[in-house]
Image: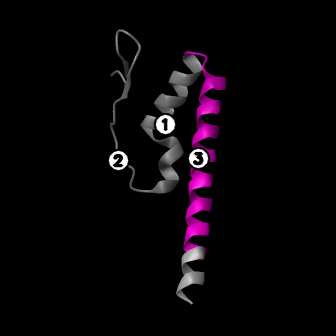
């Protein structure tokens, strides 16, 4: 069974979901994550994948920090 489907022009990638995750601890052993790791390795795009993941993490940290500052500012004005 094919777990990763790539469009003919290479513009999109579809991962086929075959199991549901009942436990968050099973995340790393899920079929989808394994397929993603295999895709990255087979296409030798480790560096690009790391850059994308680091950018996403940075954006999430910035959003979390901004929300924290906004919440703190809200509490100060309500007092």
In this rendering, would 69 be left or right of 8?
Answer: right
Q: Does 32 sit left or right of 7 as displayed?
A: right
> Is 71 included in the stretch rendered in magenta?
yes
**Residue 45, quarter of picture:** top right
Q: CA distance from mark 1 to mark 3?
A: 22 Å
Secondary structure at numbered mark 2: loop
Residue 11 picture location, percent across and down:
40, 17
Which residue appears at 51% of the width and 22% of the height? 39
Judge by depth and name the residue closer to the eye, 16 or 13. Answer: 13
- Secondary structure mostly taken by the magenta-highlighted segment of the chain: helix
Furthest residue in direction right, as rendered: 47
| Label whose residue precedes the other's in the sequence (2 or 1) | 2
**Would you name the residue on which mark 3 appears?**
59
Q: Quadrant of residue 69?
A: bottom right
Between the residue at mark 2 and the residue at mark 3, the CA separation in whole angstroms equals 28 Å
Q: Considering the numbered disc 3 on the image, is that residue within a helix, a strand or a loop?
A: helix
Q: Is residue 28 above or below residue 50?
A: below
- Check disc 1: other Cα within 10 Å, few if <14, some if 14-19, many if 20+: few
In the image, the segment drawn in magenta is 43-72
Residue at 62% from the left image edge and 24% from the top image edge: 48
Neighbor class of circle 2 (other Cα within 10 Å; few <14, some 14-19, many 20+) is few
Q: Is residue 4 above or below residue 18?
A: above
Marks 1 and 3, the one that precedes in the sequence: 1
Residue 30: within the magenta?
no
Residue 20's tag is: 2
- Residue tagged by mark 1? 33
Residue furthest to the bottom in view is 79
User: Residue 36 versus residue 20: which sits nearer the camera?
Assistant: 36
User: In front: mark 1 or mark 3?
Assistant: 3
Q: Residue 74 versus residue 64: which sits nearer the camera?
A: 74
């Amino acid at each position: 069974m094919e777990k990763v489907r790539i469009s003919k022009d290479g513009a999109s990638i579809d991962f086929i979901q075959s199991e549901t995750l009942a436990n968050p601890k099973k995340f790393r052993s899920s079929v989808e994550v394994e397929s993603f790791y295999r895709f990255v390795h087979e296409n030798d795009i480790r560096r690009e994948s790391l850059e994308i993941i680091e950018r996403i993490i940075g954006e999430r940290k910035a959003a979390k920090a901004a929300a924290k500052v906004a919440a703190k500012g809200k509490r100060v004005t309500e007092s």
